[in-house]
Image (cartoon, rainbow, N blue to C red):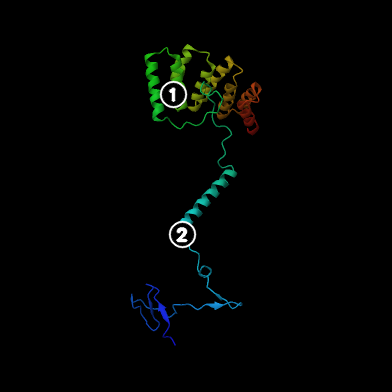
Amino acid sequence: MTKNKSIVCSVCGKENDFNNKFCSECGAKLQKQPAVQPRGKNKSGKQSRLNEQSSNPKVITSTQLIGIVVFLLAASGFLLVISGQFDTPEVTTAVNQNTREQDNSFAESHGGADLKTLQQIKDLEDIVAQNPGDLESTVKLAHLLNDNGFYKKALTYYEKYLAKKPKDVDVMIDMGVCYFELENYDKAIEVMEKAVSINPEHQIGNFNLGIVNFTANNPEKAKYWWKKAIEIDPDSRIGQKAKELLENN
């Protein structure tokens, strides 16, 4: 007999009499399946429930989907790194040589000047304009301009400084770096060669001449200068970098 059986509406969830053809709540057509599904028994005689997850496809939530995407991006990034896709180029840039780099650290790419730095530049420009003989402020301004990518303006102040102190090798090397960044390789080589002629033991000067010549497609000249940089001090950071460049180029 079916009088004790009922059927649940698949649309609104209302429990209806089994003999109803349409839902008494929403009017949807009813499917003739009992509301309570029978439970089978296993071999031990105990009842076992149907595992809905085993019979239905697994639904991926938006959170899970985002997690999968993040994982795939991280995995692809890792593969690019280990494959060398993001390796630093063998030859990147020349090295500044001035009082701001006591540890001979390599110059990094310029990220642009912030408002504070721009104000410092303006203040120094005012000082130099009012006191042309203030060489300390002049070279400090040139270095600040150089560090923040204003190479042409930096050259102007380096020239003013060197007009008074023509044998300041460190400043000449920095001036050469400005020409290098402006891709005027011939002028960079000219200035740097003049500097190392004054001080042949200037390691950064020799190293930079290697960088500039390599970039200017003069590989043999580059190796010559890197070898000289190594001879000056093979154990310094600059000497080690010169060795690395020689081995890889």
- Residue situated in front as seen by the camera: 145 or 152: 145
In the depicted structure, whether residue 121 falls above or below residue 27: above
Q: Residue 155: where, in percent of width, then height?
A: 45, 21
The quarter holding residue 86 reads top right
Q: Amino acid at mark 2?
A: Thr
Q: Which mark is residue 152?
A: 1
Q: Residue 144: where, in percent of width, then height?
A: 45, 24
Q: Earlier in the sequence, mark 1 or mark 2?
A: 2
Say which element carries label 2.
loop
Q: Residues within 10 Å of mark 2 (few under 14, many from 20)?
A: few
Point out the frontmost of discs 1 and 2.
2
> Label 1, label 2: how many angstroms apart (C-alpha)?
56 Å
Residue 187 appears in the picture as rendered = no
- Residue name at image x 43 percent, y 26 percent: 150
**Residue with the mark numbered 2:** 61
Q: Residue 143: where, in percent of width, then height?
A: 47, 22
Relative to 21, 101 lies left or right: right
Q: Residue 123: where, in percent of width, then height?
A: 38, 21
